[in-house]
Every structure is written in structure tokens, then in C-alpha cells.
Amino acid sequence: MPDAISTAQEQLGKTHERARAEEDRELATRVRELGAQLAHLFNGLFHMARTHALNNTAFDVPVREFGATLCELMELLGPATLQCVEDQIFVNDLRIRFDTLIEQSITLGADLQRHTVGGLTLNAPLSDPEIRTVVRLFSSPPTPQEPRTALQSELVAVGMSSVQVHPPFRFRITGEELHQATREFREVYLASAGTVANVFATLGADRLPSPLPVRRLVHQLIDASRLGDAAEAARNAEEALPPFAQHTLMVTNLSLVIGRAAGLSDPSLADLGVAAMFHDVGFTMREDGYSVPFERHSRAGLRVLLRQRGFHRAKLRRVLTVLQHHYAFDDPRGLPWLYARIVHIADDYDTLTRYRSGQGPILSTPDCLARMAAQAGKAYDPLLMQLFCNVMGRFPPGAILSLADGHLVLSITTVRSPETFDKPLCKVIRRPDGSAPVEDEFLDLAQGGKVAKVHHPRG
């Protein structure tokens, strides 16, 4: 019997070739057609339930058509997520578009919103009685307290735990100023821990996550990062995060920093961020009760993502990133995918500079950047590595520096302009007389001050 991973890789290779030949457009077109039909039927069932009893024979045909459409869609995608985001409807990663007349009659988002629900994931086909039950529960008056939680509990109580409901989502608020449209970066970053926890818990339970919560989170990070120095803001915020979220979010954030420096568009940045969020997804899998070891986590992650059938560009990018994010730039197997090359830099940088309990980091941020830069063209993409260095500067955030005048300071900013490449804004740790500031005190090396020594972490 062929090895499962070898089979999966062969399937992935064939899919990659199909995608390059644009055959995935046919799949996306069919998914959109079925998704539009599913949403239209679901919407119609809600409307009918307002005036007809669910045992009325008028439901027979639309219920049967809904079940058949769902089965066909799941043949292509596996579990199917139907999500309403503002005035848009998505099936998994694909936005569904309707004819104008049909679109005007779609009130699905409002019907779900009554229960504070934004969408649902169908993990298994539904029988006719189960479809009627779903329509009955969604059409019933919402529970006054925590209606979404109550609805999910009712689904579980009637044996339909395969149906998962999701909260409402917003991508961006049209017409609002940027500082009103996004929360402060720290607030967004701290709130991200819950999303990461839910995604990893869902995968660990052998279910597939809805990609939209992750994509929404990445959009928030992209928006919030425009407000200031994302790299340093993330470093400050992560102290309050649980350990499981720290690495995932920092790698995602650093990947977005590199992607922005490379000039990627916002849609491409969003795809990159989602791929980075899943880069270590293999560690959610268990072997003999333990997490898979490092040397097998990429393959384990591949197994996770391949459980969802059907391929489209966003998924293919995630799969290639998970599979290749530890490949060297000059890997004999060929040049890794762009997002994998970006995540490779972000992943290694965070691993080498992250503080470990009782040990400190493996390398100081300046030493790490220098050693990684020395591997440009071998381990790392030389252009992307140069862009990363250009952003982080000679003394990246986290560098502990002694100044010529006796100050001990902590670098807290990335490069603010070409002239400040080696002149970060610093927070004072100790004054020349040996005293520590009572309140926060800062020195801008762009206004003067010379670095005399870079302190290296204790091994």
C-alpha cells in the first residue's frame, strides 16, 4: 500500500499542474454555482417557514434540492462553510455572486443575524428531516441570552453536532477613518489569541476550520499595522498572550511586514497572513498521545489541509507554505513557493530571538539578523532577506545596547527612514549613574547618541 504522504504529494503535484494550467477556474466556477444555489435554497426555506408548517408538502422539493446540492458541493470541498460577511456571501474561501434580481431577494444574512450567527459549517450531508430541523431551529425566535450558544446547544441536543455555527464577521467598515475602522494594534493582537486557540482546537478535534475567522483576523492585523510600527507593537503586546499563540502570531505579523516591504497587494497580504497562521498546523496532530515531532510536523500539517477536498489558489498557497516553509532557498527539490520563503525568514527569526524561560533567546536580535543575512542565497531568498534587514535595521527591536555616554537602552523601533537604519528610538533601562528611571524614559539615537556595545543573551 503506497505511503499516504507520497500519495498526497503526488495528488498535490497534479493539482499544482492543473492550477498552473488554470483548470482550477473550472472548479471555482462550479463551486460558485453550487454555492449560489445552496444559499438561494436556504434563503427560500427560511422564507417559506414564515408562512408554512415544516411538514407541508411544499417543502418537499426545495428540501430535496438543498440536500442534493449540499452533497455535490461536499464532493468537491469536503465540509462546506456558508458565511455571510456584511452584504457578501462566501462558500469556504470563494465569494458567491448572484443575478441582480436574486441578490435583491437574499436576506440570509439578516435571518442568521437574529441568532447573532454569521454563518455555519456543514461537516456531513444532511437528510431531509435534518434539513427541516435546521430550518426550524433557525426560524424559531432567538433565545434572549447568548442566542448563538443556545442555537449550537440545540443542534447538539438533536444529534446534529456536525452543524457548527459561527459569529458574524466584518472585513472593513466603509466610509470610516482608518483609526475608527480598526482597533489599536495591541487590542487586535491580544484579541487574536482567541481565534488562534479556536482554530487549533478545531483542528486538534479532527475538524476543519472555517477560513473566514482567520482571514478576518489577518485583515485586522493588516489594517492595524498601518497605524504604526507593527513589529515592535507585536513584541510589546505578546507578553500578555498565552505561549501557544505567541509564535504563531509573531510569525504571521513578521511575514506581513516582509510582504508589505515586498510590495504585495492587500489581497495577497491576506493570503500570506492566512498561510503563515497555518504554518505550524501539524503540531495540532497527536502521535501516541504526544504532539508530532518537529521533523514530521510539516507532513502532518499537509495531512490536515488535504482533508479538505478541492483545490483553489488560496488553499494551494496554504498547502505549499506548510509543506515548504523549512526548505532552503537553494533546496535541490527546487525553489520554494514565495509565501514559504517569506514564512521561513519570519519563522527562523522568531525562533532564534524568542526568550525561553530561564535561558533567554538563542541570539540577540542584531546577531540573529547578521547570521541570517550571511545565509542569503543559501538558506534564505536574498531579496526577501535584504527587505527584512531594511525594515528591521542594524539594531532591531529587542536589542539591548550600551551607549558611549553610559546609558543602557532597549531598541524599540524598526527603521523609520533610510537615515535611521542604525538609529532606533530606545527605551532607557539604566542611566549613566546606575539608576533606573521611575517612569518610561526614551532616547532617540537619531537625535544623538552612539552605540558602544551590543549585549548578547546568556546561553
Image (cartoon, helix red, strand yellow):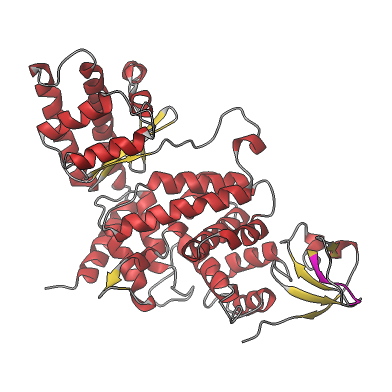
Magenta range:
427-433
Quadrant holding the C terminus: bottom right
> Left or right: 453 with respect to 312?
right
Residue 354 visible in the snapshot: yes
x then y, percent, for residue 338: 48, 61
> Left or right: 320 with respect to 267?
left
**Residue in view at x 83 percent, y 71 percent:** 436
Question: Considering only vertical position in the picture, is 60 above or below 214?
Answer: above
**Residue in view at x 35 percent, y 57 percent:** 201
The residue nearer to you, when weighing 4 against 23, is 4
**Residue in view at x 82 percent, y 77 percent:** 402
Count of marks overlaid on the render? 0
x then y, percent, for residue 282: 35, 66
Residue 16 visible in the snapshot: no
Question: Furthest-front residue in view?
Answer: 145
The residue nearer to you, when weighing 108 against 9, is 108
x then y, percent, for residue 139: 26, 24
Question: Considering only vertical position in the picture, is 292 above or below 301?
Answer: below
Residue 430 located within the stretch drawn in magenta:
yes
